[in-house]
Image (tube, helix red, strand yellow):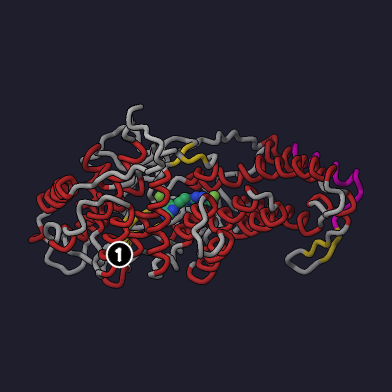
Amino acid sequence: MAGLREIEKQFFPLQKIQDVIDLFKHELKDNEPNLTLMSIVLGVIENILTVNRAVSSDADKSNTLEPIFPVIELSTIEALYTKFVTHIKRSVDKTKFPDKFATRELVKIVSDVVWCCLSKSFKDRAHLQSLYSFLTGNKLDCFGVAFAVVAAFQILEYNDVHLSLSEDHAWVVFGEDLKETAEVTWHGKGNEDKRGQPITASVVEKSWLYLNGQPVICNRHMEVAAIVSGINPSINLTVDSVEMGSLQQELLWLLYDLGHLSKYPMALGNLGDLEEISPTPGRPPPVDIFEESIQSSKVHYHNQHVYPYTYLGGYHYRNHNYKKALKAWAEATNAVKNFNYNREDEEIYKEFLEVGNDLIPTMMKHVASENASRIHQTSISYDPDCYADFLRFYDGICEWEEDSKTPVLHITWAKQLVNSLAKFDPTVRKLIHLISEDGEESSSSSESDEESEEEREIIQDENRNQKKKVKAKKGKTHDKDKSDKINGQAEDS
Ligand SMILES: FC(F)c1nnc(N2CCN(c3ncnc4sc(CC(F)(F)F)cc34)CC2)s1
């Protein structure tokens, strides 16, 4: 890959969202969309709209609602593009690697070429995912390093090195028919990086971090989807840039219409979240998009992905559809129960900790008060389906913990479980018909002393392996704490 092609230059200067859409439309027609160019363009725009927002003086705080969109000059982009291409070509002597396919040694070298420039400061801040961040601040997050390696291989004209994505990690596949895998970035906090090493079957098996061998293996177009999905419109923890969110939403619809999201459940989930914030006329409602995300995981990934269900559960919770939220969360633990929890699975643990110890208790309280007002409609505390899904949610968590090296549950879980259980009406607890896996039938015990004995056992057991887990909010890219944001949108005046 040489310098920018003439046809690419003609799209500049970019003056409005449609100009960016047109550039991406053009790139996506190509079977080698220019990853470096697109990552830099999105990084420049994101930086201006979120990090270095032009603070307009009072004078021009005219009352027009004319949103701000920066003018992106070709010279700005070309300088950064040339810097990256030069850095990569100067650091890799291709004559030593005559093969058509990449080798593990070469993957490690390219990973080092990215790695060596990184500053050792904060790595899980927001807006560190793009090549713009790498080229102007020597900072990249976990995803950004893996993406930079793939973009570098595109510049070196290898078309076998591709991004492999799980729900909380990224690595590369390479070689003939993508048979090889290699770590190219770090994961989490306090873990030694394993760059250059293959991801072996023993590491992958029953591991959520590696999706039990069902990661999203990208082609070039899905790598474009990954950088679009990785756009972070956040200005701060509570406010998003309206323009950046619209750009991300329109680019995701462009990729959706071209079919590049069909095997990418998280990108579909991101699109569903954006549609909830600001629905696009003529497009399907968020629940349909979350359903497509779930279907994609079922069809392409053996239903091993968890986030499609927690996207849906979060959506129903925010919209007070508590019965559907419980159903989605029960299906989420039905997916996670096949994994064995280990210390690098912190992110999904935090997700379920929030559901079990924050969202469900709040929902049960909410319903109790609503109940007083709406006596006719059966509220969830009288609904046997809800009680069944509630039990399924916890059953999945317990099965997840079984055979795991690291315990999942601790006393807070037990206390909240007892707390939420008590909020279901005793009549509904009698209606449940428990059928164990071996088909043995039993109805849930309604004897209070038996239950209190059971509850006492749970609490004593949990006391023993009580473990404090602090829910650390991470501001990293592919930031899953978006849903915690109050959907305030910046007045980009
Ligand atoms: F469960 C729901 F509440 C979620 N809401 N946002 C969620 N995200 C936000 C987007 N997100 C993602 N969205 C697209 N692609 C990727 S690739 C990836 C792993 C890593 F960052 F590359 F290491 C994460 C991720 C991670 C999960 S889950």
Using the image as rendered, state which of residue 356 and residue 462 is in the foreground. Answer: 356
Secondary structure predominantly adopted by residues drawn in magenta = helix
Q: Position of residue 60 (x, y in %)?
A: 33, 32
Magenta-drawn stretch contains 445: yes
Indicate the secondary structure of the residue bearing disc 1: helix
Farthest residue in the top direction?
Answer: 58
Q: Position of residue 491 (x, y in %)?
A: 44, 38
Examine the rendering and report whether any part of residue 453 can be seen.
no
Examine the rendering and report whether any part of residue 426 can be seen.
yes
Residue 33 lies left or right of residue 330; in this view the side is left
Considering only vertical position in the picture, is 20 above or below 118? below
Farthest residue in the left direction?
Answer: 95
Q: Which residues are magenta?
A: 444-461
**Residue at the spot of label 1:** 25
Q: Position of residue 223 (x, y in %)?
A: 33, 60
Using the image as rendered, state which of residue 164 and residue 382 is in the foreground. Answer: 382
Give the amino acid type for the residue marked by disc 1 in the picture: Lys
Q: Residue at 87% of width from left, 49% of height from top? A: 375
Magenta-drawn stretch contains 443: no
Farthest residue in the front direction?
Answer: 63
Mark 1 closeness class: few <14, some 14–19, many ≥20 residues within 10 Å: some
Q: Looking at the rendering, in which quadrant would you find the C terminus?
A: top left
Q: Is mark 1 within 8 Å of ligand 1?
A: no
Using the image as rendered, state which of residue 264 and residue 101 is in the foreground. Answer: 264
Residue 434 lies left or right of residue 176; in this view the side is right
